[in-house]
Image (cartoon, grey):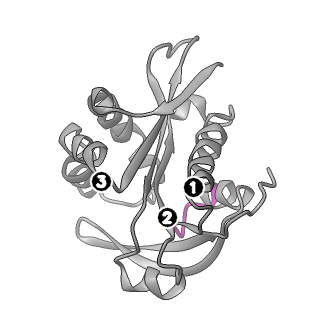
Amino acid sequence: MEVRIRQAGAIDATALAELAAITFPLASPADSPEEDVSAFIAANLGAASFLKYLSDSQRVLFVAEEVSGDLAGRLVAYAMLVDAPPSDPDVASVVTHSDAVELSKCYAHPAVHGGGVAAKIMRASLAWVAQHGNRTTWLGVNNENVRAQTFYGKHGFSIAGTRSFQLGTRVEHDFVMVRPPGKTITG
């Protein structure tokens, strides 16, 4: 499969929302109530939300667009970086660098899992961080999502702490993973 990684623009908002509706449930614990997952998607991952993210000067979004194959022309992965200090006190207690960058989202369509697309978009995201000061990068990942934790570990992230994440009526528990500047990729 051949994909093109590029920075997203406002024209991508609807496609990003469609992709997020497919990928966000995959990162949620299996026992998360469907109505809570759907409500989170509606409130935070719709086209209007993506338009706001794309117009925010503290955010940059990358997309992977398939150029050939069954999903040609469609977005198959995306990542969002937030260039702002952590606002969550639990995160701020372990991410002590005020200029740290958050990898807020990094999702791939299930049809491309295992094909290297997520690694490509991760490399593009980390390259952006390196080009903009080579700073600490952090993310939150559900403590039950071992597949994602392993993926992030291969890209230089390690568990540094925990935070809570409200998903509807439930409080989920995330690991905070941190990647120091200049860390090499192992996988």
Q: Residues within 10 Å of mark 1 (few under 14, many from 20)?
A: many
83 with respect to 159 (left or right) = left
Numbered circle sitting on residue 129:
1
- Which residue is identified by label 3? 37
Instruction: Please name whichever residue, 96 or 150, is drawn nearer the observer in this view of the structure.
Output: 96
**Alpha carbon separation for disc pair 3 and 1:** 30 Å
Magenta range is 141-147
Q: Position of residue 21 (x, y in %)?
A: 33, 39
For label 3, the crowd category at 10 Å Cα-Cα, with few meaning under 14, some 14 to 19 and many 20 or more, is: some
Q: Secondary structure at mark 3?
A: helix
Label 2 crowd bin: few (<14), some (14–19), many (20+), radius 10 Å:
many
Mark 3 or mark 1, earlier in chain: 3
Give the residue number, with chain letter if any, for mark 2.
101
- Would you say the residues marked 1 and 2 are in contact, meaning their CB atoms lie under 8 Å apart? yes
Residue 153 is situated, as x and y percent measured from the top left of the image, at: 70, 61
Kindly report which numbered mark, 3 or 1, lies closer to the viewer in this rendering: 1
What amino acid does circle 3 point to? Val
Choose between 134 and 146: the one closer to the eye: 134
